[in-house]
Amino acid sequence: MEILGIFSAFGLSASAGLNAYIPLLVIALLARFTNLIQLKQPWDTLESWWIIGLLFVLSIIEFFADKVPAVNHINDAIQTFVRPVAGAIAFAASANILTEVSPVLSLASGLLVAGGIHAVKSAAVRPAITATTGGAANIPVSILEDILSTMVSVLSVIVPVLMVILVVILIAWWISSRQQRRAST
């Protein structure tokens, strides 16, 4: 059962790389209203109505900020610091549910996973999409990122093994598509 906690932790921290507040809000709501997550201290603070409200407001702000041209670049710059921290919190809170992983190792792992996803998104994927579509695809891609972050967050808690399979498939697809692009140039 401990390995499932790690799978959940990786999925939740990866989704924080796309949207900082969605996985934290999912953890908070699932912990508050279901038996799927039972947070240990100090992570049980996420269940507080004040924290849930704050996460909801921050999610709404990030949702709209990421859809407005020029503001989305400022948002990504700010999120360069926020998303890795959110990933660290998500990883540590969820890994500590079923496992006794060191808090320092949990925080570092979440920081690296969310930071890596955010770096790829903000430094490679988004600029390429903006350049190739003249910015026309930024809003649909941002909405897709929010949907993906939500789905990955929920599924990471409910079906953590499925998330591992999904991550492997996505990595294989990404490697394959990069190799095809290199072969065509």
Image: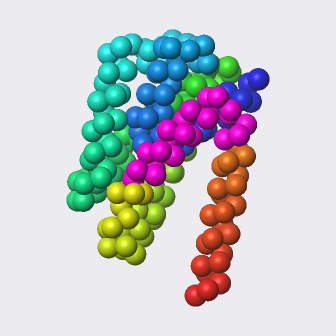
Percent of width and height locating residue 31: 52, 17
What main secondary structure does the magenta stretch of the protein show?
Answer: helix
Furthest-bottom residue in view?
185
Question: Which residues, given as a range, are shown in magenta?
Answer: 142-163
Percent of width and height locating residue 159: 68, 32
Q: Quadrant of residue 110?
A: top right
Residue 130 in view in this figure: yes
Choose between 138 and 15: the one closer to the eye: 138
Q: Residue at x 34, y 28 (%)?
A: 56
Q: Quadrant of residue 94?
A: top right
Q: Say if the magenta span includes residue 6.
A: no
Q: Is residue 105 above or below residue 143?
A: above
Question: Which color scheme did the rendering employ for the protein?
Answer: rainbow
Furthest-right residue in view?
1
Q: What quarter of the picture does the N terminus occupy?
A: top right
Q: Residue at x 40, y 34 (%)?
A: 21
Q: Residue at x 63, y 71 (%)?
A: 177
How many numbered marks does the figure carry?
Answer: 0
Residue 109 in view in this figure: no
Percent of width and height locating residue 29: 47, 21
Q: What quarter of the picture does the C terminus occupy?
A: bottom right
Q: Residue at x 32, y 21 (%)?
A: 53
Q: Say if the magenta span includes residue 153.
A: yes
Q: Is residue 127 left or right of residue 183?
A: left
Percent of width and height locating residue 170: 64, 56
Q: Is residue 28 above or below residue 70?
A: above
